[in-house]
Image: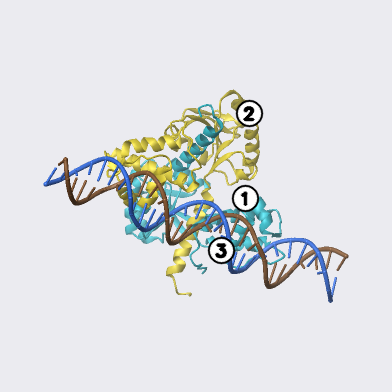
Chain colours: A yellow, B cyan, C brown, D blue
Amino acid sequence: MHRYKNISSPVIKRLPRYYRFLGELRDKGVIRISSRELSDKMGFTASQIRQDLNCFGGFGQQGYGYPVESLYNEIGHILGLDHTYNAILIGAGNLGKAVAMHMSFEKRGFRLTAIFDNDPKKIGTNIRDIRISDLDSLERFCSENKTDAAIFCVPKNAAHEIADRLYKVGVRNYWNFSHYDLSVHYDDIIVENVHLNDSLMILCYKISDANDLTDNTTA
Amino acid sequence: MHRYKNISSPVIKRLPRYYRFLGELRDKGVIRISSRELSDKMGFTASQIRQDLNCFGGFGQQGYGYPVESLYNEIGHILGLDHTYNAILIGAGNLGKAVAMHMSFEKRGFRLTAIFDNDPKKIGTNIRDIRISDLDSLERFCSENKTDAAIFCVPKNAAHEIADRLYKVGVRNYWNFSHYDLSVHYDDIIVENVHLNDSLMILCYKISDANDLTDNTTA
DNA sequence: AATACTATGTCAAAAAATTAACAAATTATC
DNA sequence: GATAATTTGTTAATTTTTTGACATAGTATT
């Protein structure tokens, strides 16, 4: 498939943003775009855009720019969105439910195949046509059904144990919403964290910092 | 208040993580910790930890290490968690509801003061003791009640308009869950993004990339 | 068809971030 | 109390990332 030589993490993190903006342009019927124009819209420098895209190949044409549609598709391919990875969701609380309802997994390379919880009141009910299963049946399900990734929407103290169980049955890719750092215990796993608490604290810092700079009454 | 000279963004992003790990240590009754031990636990280099912490002052003692409890409190203070910023939530869908239910705002420097939605079926119902108000009353509420930040849990196409409205009444700090880049239109605002789609795509990339490296059948 | 213009890909320079090294200070030990 | 062992704070070196510069190639126009 693709296989690009050591793309740096800052570049990877920018890819979804390129994808998003190019998708918008495509929807507006824009045919071509220059790195300069993209720069104005996205807030990256034109130089960075050219360098980023060039990691994966020369998609542009000198004197013309980049063809929007094909670049959009190309980045989707680079991101692996044309895959269909089977993902299971652990934890059907507010957050798990929101993630299950809110995300269009299919457009992001995934398919939600099962949802697990340990609350008897929830087990048997449905979220989006998917029946919530007993957490006890986790291992059986994973051994009977190809499972590529697990989405962690469980409390901190449950995360560690469930990660161990999943690791044992070979599930090594995690989308982690729990306030727990999975990567601390294993190093041959892939984790993408969504630490909402951290994010909120960073907002708190930024606001506090900005206030301190303007309110110079104390200084 | 604090006021630190230009702390770099990588450092700021690591602060919540320090806070989290130190909180765990404190709960376990650990009194002191060296940068080396923290390094083992957290996966940062000891050198980085020392340099990060030293941005804000010399909290450690040579030959001894860092006192866990006071360092924990110090970082909480640096993050501004001892503030109480009033925040409103826009959008009471699955995601908004999950955010409202799931986060302990009080521990992160915030207080949730109002929730807005434009769905008549939702208006008047409660989430966590907070009544959902009509989005039409947004401006009135903000002018009558001190509002420091807004949490965006609305669809992409609604985000832009609501941001404009909030900007006009002086709300300039946003926790943004919408698939929309608020920072593109204004530069005197503070935005902390939670782009779940981007995060999922990055996971997709990582999985695809790892697979390509192991499956060398095609290469 | 020739000329002026545009915009990429790429190489070099600058800036930023991470890691390493070590002197100074403190603790623990004998 | 003197000595050995720790461990910080800080400076320097390295690595990574971003920005700038420009030759080259293609487009549009006359």
Q: Nearer the viewer, residue A89 or B203?
A: B203
* Residue A145 image-quadrant placement: top right
Dot in front, 2 or 1: 1
Residue visible at 62% across and 54% down? B45
Viewed as shown, does residue A123 lie left or right of A164? left
Residue B155 in sight here: no
What chain does badge 1 belong to?
B
Label 2 SS: helix
Q: Which residue is mark 2?
A: A139
Q: Amino acid at mark 2?
A: Glu
Q: Label 3's element?
A: helix
Residue at horizontal 52%, vertical 36%? B207
Query: Mark 3: which amino acid?
Result: His
Residue A138 appears in the picture as rendered:
yes
Q: CA distance from mark 2 to mark 1?
A: 29 Å
Q: Which element carries disc 1, helix, strand or loop?
A: loop
Q: Earlier in the sequence, mark 3 or mark 1?
A: 1
- Provide residue B22's location: percent of width, then percent of height: 64, 56
Crowdedness near tag 2: few (<14), some (14–19) or many (≥20) residues, C-alpha within 10 Å: some
Q: Which mark is residue B77?
A: 3
Q: Which residue is drawn at the image coordinates 52% and 58% (left, top)?
A: B12
* Residues tagged 2 and 3 counted as in contact (Cβ below 8 A): no
The disc placed on residue B43 is 1
* Coordinates of residue A155 in the picture (x, y in percent): 59, 43
